[in-house]
Image: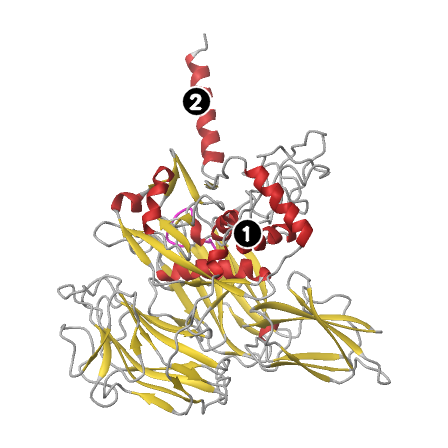
Amino acid sequence: MKSRKQIVVFLALVMLTTVRFGFAQEKDCGAEPPKNYDTFMLKRLKSITDNGTKALATPVSLPIQHHVSRNSSGGSPAVSSAQIQNVMDELNATYAPMNISFHEYAPTKYIDNTSWNNSFNKSNDSQLVQYEVAEAINIFYFSEVTSGSSTICGFAKFPGTGNRAVLDASCSQNGSTSSHELGHYFSILHTHSTSNGRELVKRTNCSSTGDFFCDTPADPRLSGLVNSSCNYTGTATDANGDQYQPDVNNVMSYTRKSCRTGGFSSQQQNAIVASLESDRSYLTSPTNPPTCTTISNFPYSESFESGLGDWANATGDDIEWTRDSNGTPSSGTGPSTAQNGSFYLYTEASTNVTPAGSPNKTAILNSPCIDLSQASNMSLEFGYHMLGNDIGTLEVLISTNDGTSYTSLWSQNGDKGDTWSQATVDLSGYSGVIKLQFKGTTGASWRSDMAIDNIKIKETTTNPSSCNGITSFPYTESFESGIGEWTQETGDDINWTVDSNGTPSSSTGPSSATNGSNYIFTEASGSGNGYPNKVALLTSPCIDLTHESNAELSFDYHMYGSNMGTLEVRLSTNDGVNWTTAWSKNGNQGNSWSSQTINLSAYSGSTIKLQLKGTTGSNYRSDMAIDNLKITSGAADSDLIDNEIGTTNQKIMIYPNPISSGSLSIQRSGFSKNGEKTQITITDFLGKTIDIVDSNNETTAYDVSNLSNGIYFIIINNKEGQVTRKFIKR
């Protein structure tokens, strides 16, 4: 019999093992292929081999219907509208190489069920059918998703088994799970699948075992076998004794969620496109677009003095935009007068009306068709009023496909005081016929009436690229004298704080700066105040890159804490109207400073703003910090250059970059000798050749109208060598 001492030692070792390994385990996926799925996949792959495809010939935008769980009282939604947008951004980036994009089919639908909102068990999956929209991809969000007694990141229905994906709220924000689950939705198995046998490292059986794809290496199942640097640490061997060398970046693997940055392999893309064209073809069924009144004479204005004019309330939303004057019925919210004339439109958030106006009720106002074919440098201007303790969100959205899908152009949320504010939204990147939407989402109570007035569409008369901020480089900021020219946003939850010599909370935050004495950090202490999921936003002044070709942002960051959240660097090219995430990191990175460099060369010729976004984790051990921030110019763009031509007389400039429409100018000097031609190759970011142009002119105009939105590379070759540059189509 074992002694009591031996038993105690054994139990202690078990507990240590649990602490060391159990808590670090990431949640798995709960997707399960149906029986005999191997037969289905083998037929699918034969069809692909016979026909061959990867990207769709014509770009498609697929509809997604979002379903968000809430408590039975309508509170505590599993995800916010901003988090849903994060999911859309992730999906659009991951599926762009296949010419697939996504749009919201209709306003978010809510499921008010406290039990499900707290924890949705996969055993209830069949009950979700009642909420589905037949002609869209249905994505359901719950605060927690479980399978039996285990928590999981989510699951999706394989072709022939359903029309939905289910996501754990936190996993939906990790940058890869949403794409992973839609991979299953479009027929793809895990890279470690053994449904028809285990794949060998030498891939001699790759077309009939594993995940059935020969361009994804044999995978032993990567859970717990990939370190924070995204390196495989396992030592397992296959049946032949060969050691595995898996792809730790494939989105369908069980690597760390933050490491799944490699998207889909070529053969996986083939299968996704084939699935869309056959199993999920209902997503691309054509509809007859409605006709609408067209506005083509500018300047155009509408102040609602004689009704809604050519604008119309949408169907399918919750409440209406209402014409009013001299104050809304509720005290402490809404305007008392119009900005122009006597009338304005507003959203009534009171709960004692029918239908109830709060919480989180959406009102959508649709514009007429707006023909910009003969217009240039256009902008939308309007007044808005957002007064109330519980004010929600106001957005402007745009459609370039007759209302089939909309993209957010501008948004504001939170109380802006009892005054009319003025907004200007840049439309210069759009041509042809567009539609606009004003989308108002009420807040948590009746004190969230918001209003719009004095809408104008006209030619922009000011120079949008003028900048009175950062215009000379190198620029440095180490926060030794405060936050400098940076600005704390007012619509977030907490602030970035200047500090030195350690944050107030133990086991989190840095103990010292990396440059000088000070740094900035987010204080996560206080349940409901500093955590969970509280956002801190710090925005830079404008940064003038109009004469910079190789600018870089570098900074040091510290993310130490057992419940660490997410740090992002965001970028805007339209003075903060819209933001794009340029870099992000989440989770505990250890008690040390790390360094990061972000290449800004894609924004050469532009004026930008940067924003530091910190989102705290699930408790106070999630302080994060930034220090030693620099913007430099003139450094070699090492990640974009291959055997670059080395003479000082050879220069290249690409503008405008990013570009929305029209012609991209490729200007180069010193590349041609004695009239010899220079070859210009356009590729997508996976290296697929899009076009080849021969030119002996110093400036070549390249029409981007046939390119879908995404990242592209320009490769210039001549006898002297090769140079590569990146541009972005938006």
Q: Specify the amino acid type for callout 2.
A: Leu
Single out the residue that lies furthest toward the top: 1
Residue 370 in the image, given as x and y percentages of width and height = 42, 83
- Locate residue 186 relative to residue 144 in the image: left or right: right
* Mark 2 to mark 1 CA distance (whole Å): 50 Å
**Residue 500 in view, yes or no:** no
Within the image, what quadrant is residue 67 found in? bottom left
Q: Is residue 135 visible?
A: yes
**SS class, disc 1:** helix
Q: Residue furthest front?
A: 288
* Quarter of the figure with the N terminus: top left
The answer to which of 2 and 218 lies nearer the viewer is: 218
How many other residues sit within 10 Å of disc 1, few (<14), some (14-19) or many (≥20)? some
Give residue 590's position: percent from left, percent from top: 51, 48
Which secondary structure lies at badge 2?
helix
Q: Of residues 624 and 305, which is closer to you in this image?
A: 305
Q: Return the x and y of residue 139 as percentages of the image width and height.
A: 40, 53
Q: Residue 265: say if magenta.
A: no
Of residues 649 and 702, the one drawn nearer to the viewer in this rendering: 702
Residue carrying label 1: 275
Q: Nearer the viewer, residue 486 or 217?
A: 217
Amino acid at pointer 1: Ser
Check whether the beta carbons of the residues at disc 2 and disc 1 lie within 8 A of each other.
no
Q: Which residues are magenta?
A: 503-512
Q: Quadrant of residue 342?
A: bottom left
Q: Which residue is mark 2?
A: 11
